[in-house]
């Protein structure tokens, strides 16, 4: 196949480029509609009890509160221009002041007249005391906005524009899940634009410095942009058929640009190397596609194997990243194999046009420093590897006490309005039921059993009260009828609202969910427990329960792919072990920063448990990219070994010839991810910084130190396989080797590396 691609590229280069350009234009036209198809949310397990509870509430009880308007005198709003005007002696600042009450009642009336809104309640309604703050100066209007995630977002945005803002001395701020989702989605768009504005120019400059030529620098960028455009088209199609998260755009841009650069860099660097060795353009292109092209396909397969594991998790937020990630890998491979070869065929030696001054050193095909580093490490493998392992294990140690959660308004900056409202609600409205647990019976329940069940729930630690259609209960005692009791009863179900003093999503709140579920349901009925705390418990369970299976799938597929590539059973095990250490270190640093709160003031975020979904995503993406570089390095070692190179020279020359590529590729890819460190959304910041750090750790410490140390300690056993598997590999394995003789390979070896390697090999190690 690779020979055929090279032959077609040489004979029909311009036709391939024209067809490729037309395809890109078509994909761009389709991909422009992707943003309109993508959705927010997607963090919950669709099969969880809390999700079923939410569906029943939407269907039978007109939905849960997801939009909140906080109404107060303008001087009392956070960030108001005259905060001192809000004082205890000024009765006009109270929620029952005429101007404040008039504005609040107008909002409630307007919402009740809107067919897209239900369950409207306000502080000024009879029995609305729980919607008034402790000091009586703030009041709430709460409602449920109907529709799916996309419809709720659009409708909430319209309502916030209509009823929010300061007017007539009254401030109205919007909060709730719908407002927070809108704020997060809007901030993601801004962050994406900033990240791209940073990553693309920096990447282009670095590519020009690496290649020493503006023409060569543009080639990897072309592949990256084609991969992004193609994946946008894929997301448009998938978004028309199923739920796809808007956050998948972030992975598409970072991974598309990074992998496109990686693959094009490998091809262009190998082409440079072949030209520098004296090959003519046709021969150089054929060898490039045969060797580097095969490496790219295997590398992509390992990344796809890691990302495919995300399909095993129920939340469509994670599955969306599998759609985007697998799509962008495939697009990057196709664009690298079918765009770069014809471009190289047309350009030939002109690929070095537009020379960048003072960059002559980068035109070397090899990187002697990496070969010499490998030689030093292999002379004293234990002494050099142990300090690195100690540092990585120390970096991983924060994982021993880490806690996990899900995204909420705290991922937003403190200036976000929905976050300000959430903070004030938790602080000033202790009996507000917006964050309450929602308990739904699955069958009709008579008043007597319903009262007994509510009494039991009200006696649990942390429960303030339980509202039912049969009355409200505190600490096991009846408190009289519940305001709006009729709304809590249906012929075939009952709704109980369990109000708690616990901070939402805290460990205590999660424990309460389990305690509520442990209370015996009324006779003849089951119960479903919903609310954001129940959703958190179910989401963590949905992900953690599938982690072993997903991890097993990644390990198995990676092992099989690397065995087919190398013919060894030891190399895959060595790669898996070293990658696990580097990933643990990267995630440990993220736990130290984002969960423990170190550098929170510097980076501008609020410390909170690591987002479960983003942690899993970081591990899968970073693992795939680590295997990407594993294949880059191992492919060259295998090629040298098949060509007759023996002993330690396989490692030293392999690293000398791939070290610069891995370093440059990792540096450029990390730029794409580190750019998301500028995000105002804390879990995106964590993902960007964590992925970038994992790439740097892998490229520098793992490839530079741990790989040569492990190869030296393993010696000849590094390439071991049982006889049966050796025969199997001989029949079905795919070799990376370029079908040239060992003599030719030795002849093309870099002068500096050749001078160094024989001295190492002469000692007879390996």
Image (spheres, rainbow, N blue to C red):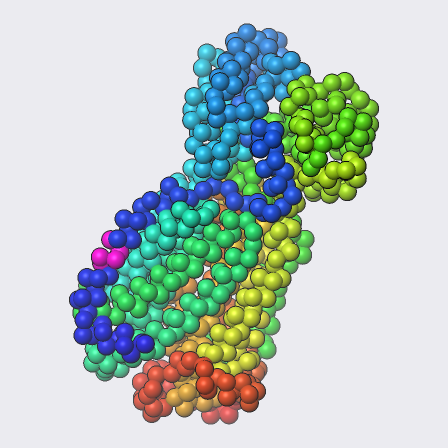
* Residue at 29%, 53% in the rendered image: 27
Q: Is residue 116 left or right of residue 60?
A: left
* Residue at 53%, 78% in the rendered image: 571
Front residue (pair 526, 750): 526
Q: Is residue 742 left or right of residue 15?
A: right
Image location of residue 66, percent across then percent down: 55, 30
Q: Please, is residue 441 above or below residue 688 in the view? A: above
Front residue (pair 708, 31): 31
Image location of residue 140, percent across then percent down: 58, 21
Total of numbered circles in the picture?
A: 0
Q: Please, is residue 255 above or below residue 196 in the view? A: below
* Residue at 51%, 87% in the rendered image: 726
Can you tell which quarter of the image residue 323 is in?
Answer: bottom left
Q: Please, is residue 473 above or below residue 91 in the view? A: below
Image location of residue 602, percent across then percent down: 51, 43
Answer whether residue 594 is visible to the viewer in this image.
no
Can you tell which quarter of the image residue 482 is in?
Answer: top right
Can you tell which quarter of the image residue 93 is in?
Answer: top right
Q: Can you say which quadrant of the picture contains the N terminus?
A: bottom left
Q: Is residue 434 left or right of residue 18?
A: right
Answer whether residue 124 is visible to the viewer in this image.
yes
Image location of residue 479, percent across then percent down: 78, 20
**Magenta highlight: main SS:** helix
Front residue (pair 313, 97): 313
Tell me where the magenta segment starts and ends, as one range.
21-25
* Residue at 42%, 63% in the rendered image: 666
User: Magenta stretch: residue 634 in it?
Assistant: no
């Amino acid at each position: 196949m690779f020979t055929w691609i090279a032959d077609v590229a040489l004979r029909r280069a311009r036709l391939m480029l024209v067809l490729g350009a037309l395809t890109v234009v078509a994909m761009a036209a389709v991909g422009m509609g992707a943003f309109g198809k993508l959705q927010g949310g997607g963090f919950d397990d669709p099969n969880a009890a809390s999700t079923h509870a939410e569906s029943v509430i939407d269907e039978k009880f007109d939905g849960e509160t997801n939009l909140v308007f906080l109404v107060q005198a303008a001087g009392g709003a956070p960030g108001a221009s005259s905060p001192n005007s809000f004082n205890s002696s000024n009765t006009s600042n109270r929620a029952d002041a005429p101007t404040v009450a008039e504005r609040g009642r107008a909002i409630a009336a307007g919402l009740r007249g809107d067919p897209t809104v239900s369950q409207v309640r306000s502080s000024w309604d009879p029995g609305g005391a729980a919607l008034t703050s402790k000091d009586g100066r703030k009041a709430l209007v709460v409602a449920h906005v109907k529709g799916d995630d996309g419809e709720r977002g659009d409708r909430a945005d319209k309502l916030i524009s209509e009823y929010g803002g300061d007017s007539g001395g009254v401030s109205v701020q919007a909060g709730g899940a719908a407002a927070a989702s809108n704020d997060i989605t809007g901030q993601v768009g801004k962050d994406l634009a900033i990240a791209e504005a940073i990553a693309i120019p920096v990447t282009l400059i670095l590519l020009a410095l690496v290649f020493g030529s503006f023409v060569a620098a543009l080639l990897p960028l072309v592949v990256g942009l084609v991969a992004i455009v193609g994946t946008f088209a894929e997301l448009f199609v998938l978004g028309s058929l199923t739920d796809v998260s808007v956050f998948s755009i972030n992975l598409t841009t970072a991974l598309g640009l990074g992998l496109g650069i990686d693959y094009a860099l490998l091809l262009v660097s190998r082409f440079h190397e072949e030209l520098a060795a004296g090959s003519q353009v046709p021969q150089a292109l054929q060898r490039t596609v045969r060797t580097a092209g095969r490496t790219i396909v295997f590398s992509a397969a390992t990344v796809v194997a890691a990302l495919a594991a995300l399909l095993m998790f129920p939340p469509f937020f994670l599955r969306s990243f599998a759609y985007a990630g697998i799509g962008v890998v495939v697009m990057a491979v196709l664009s690298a194999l079918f765009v770069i070869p014809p471009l190289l065929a047309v350009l030939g030696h002109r690929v070095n046009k537009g020379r960048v001054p003072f960059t002559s050193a980068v035109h070397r095909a090899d990187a002697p420093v990496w070969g010499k580093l490998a030689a030093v490490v292999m002379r004293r493998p234990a002494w050099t590897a142990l300090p690195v392992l100690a540092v990585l294990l120390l970096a991983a140690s924060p994982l021993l006490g880490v806690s996990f959660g899900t995204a909420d308004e705290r991922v937003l900056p403190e200036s976000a309005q929905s976050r300000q409202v959430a903070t004030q609600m938790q602080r000033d409205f202790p009996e507000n039921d917006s964050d309450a647990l929602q308990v739904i019976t699955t069958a009709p329940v008579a008043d007597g059993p319903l009262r007994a069940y509510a009494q039991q729930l009200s006696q649990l630690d942390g429960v303030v009260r339980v509202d039912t259609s049969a009355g409200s209960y505190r600490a096991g005692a009846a408190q009289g009828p519940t305001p709006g009791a009729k709304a809590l009863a249906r012929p075939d179900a009952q709704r109980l609202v369990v109000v708690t003093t616990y901070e939402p999503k805290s460990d205590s709140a999660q424990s309460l969910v389990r305690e509520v579920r442990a209370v015996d349901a009324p006779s003849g009925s089951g119960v479903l427990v919903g609310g954001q705390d129940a959703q958190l418990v179910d989401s963590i369970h949905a992900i953690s329960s599938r982690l072993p299976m997903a991890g097993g799938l990644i390990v198995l597929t990676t092992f099989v792919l690397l065995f087919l590539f190398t013919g060894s059973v030891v190399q895959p095990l060595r790669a898996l072990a070293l990658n696990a250490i580097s990933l643990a270190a990267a995630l440990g640093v993220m736990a130290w920063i984002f969960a423990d709160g170190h550098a929170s003031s510097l980076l501008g975020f609020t410390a909170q448990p690591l987002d479960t979904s983003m942690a899993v995503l970081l591990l899968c993406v970073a693992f795939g990219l680590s295997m990407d570089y594993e294949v880059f390095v191992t492919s060259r070692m295998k090629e040298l070994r098949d060509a007759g190179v023996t002993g330690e020279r396989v490692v030293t020359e392999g690293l000398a010839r791939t070290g610069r590529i891995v370093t440059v590729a990792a540096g450029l890819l990390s730029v794409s991810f580190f750019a998301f460190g500028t995000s105002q959304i804390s879990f995106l910041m964590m993902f960007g910084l964590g992925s970038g750090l994992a790439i740097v750790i892998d490229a520098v410490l793992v490839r530079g130190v741990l790989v040569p140390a492990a190869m030296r300690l393993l010696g000849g056993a590094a390439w071991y396989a049982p006889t049966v598997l050796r025969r199997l590999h001989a029949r079905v394995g795919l070799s990376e080797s370029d079908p040239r003789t060992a003599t030719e390979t030795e002849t093309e070896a870099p002068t500096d590396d050749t001078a160094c390697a024989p001295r190492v090999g002469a000692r007879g190690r390996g």
